[in-house]
């Protein structure tokens, strides 16, 4: 179980416990937001292995995030066949 996991079946009845639960949720959100930003930075500096790991961890909590899925897929591709030196971390969409 993750350090940020909160039992979802536990009913919180007092204000102190509720405040602690919200604090844990806020910490988890901040942690995941930081992980996403870190993954983007790794991607931009061509560290596709670390970007892949960080996007994968982010997607464990937000499996429907389409942009994170796209970056993960591109990181996997670039890990196997890195872009040329002229690449500036700009991704061009081919379809809508």
Image: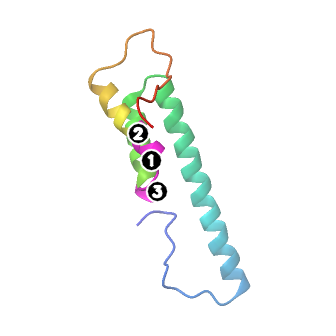
View extreme (right): residue:
15
User: Which residue in the protein does label 1 denote?
Assistant: 66
Proximity of marks 3 and 2: CB atoms separated by less than 8 Å:
no
Is 38 placed left or right of 26 in the picture?
Answer: left
Q: Horizontal and vertical percent for residue 93?
A: 45, 30
Q: Residue at (53%, 45%) from the top-left corner? A: 35
Q: Residue at (43%, 37%) from the top-left corner? A: 71
View extreme (left): residue:
80
Proximity of marks 1 and 2: CB atoms separated by less than 8 Å:
yes
Instruction: Give the Cα distance between marks 3 and 2.
Output: 13 Å
The segment highlighted magenta reads 60-71
Residue 46, image quadrant: top left
Q: Residue at (52%, 34%) from the top-left corner? A: 40
Q: Residue at (46%, 51%) from the top-left corner? A: 65
Q: Give the quadrant of the C terminus.
A: top left
Q: Residues within 10 Å of mark 3 (few under 14, many from 20)?
A: some
SS at mark 1 in the image: helix
SS at mark 2 in the image: helix
Q: Main secondary structure of the magenta part?
A: helix
User: Which residue in the protein does label 2 denote?
Assistant: 70
* Mark drawn on residue 62: 3
**The magenta stretch spans residue 75:** no
**56 up-or-down from 39: above or below:** below
């Amino acid at each position: 179980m993750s350090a940020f996991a909160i039992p979802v079946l536990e009913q919180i009845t007092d204000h102190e416990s509720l405040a602690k639960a919200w604090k844990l949720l806020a910490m988890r959100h901040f942690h995941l937001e930081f992980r996403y930003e870190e993954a983007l930075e790794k991607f931009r500096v061509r560290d596709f292995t670390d970007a892949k790991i960080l996007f994968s961890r982010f997607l464990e909590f937000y499996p429907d995030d389409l942009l994170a899925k796209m970056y993960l897929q591109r990181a996997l591709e670039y890990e196997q066949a890195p872009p040329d030196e002229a690449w500036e971390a700009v991704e061009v969409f081919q379809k809508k």
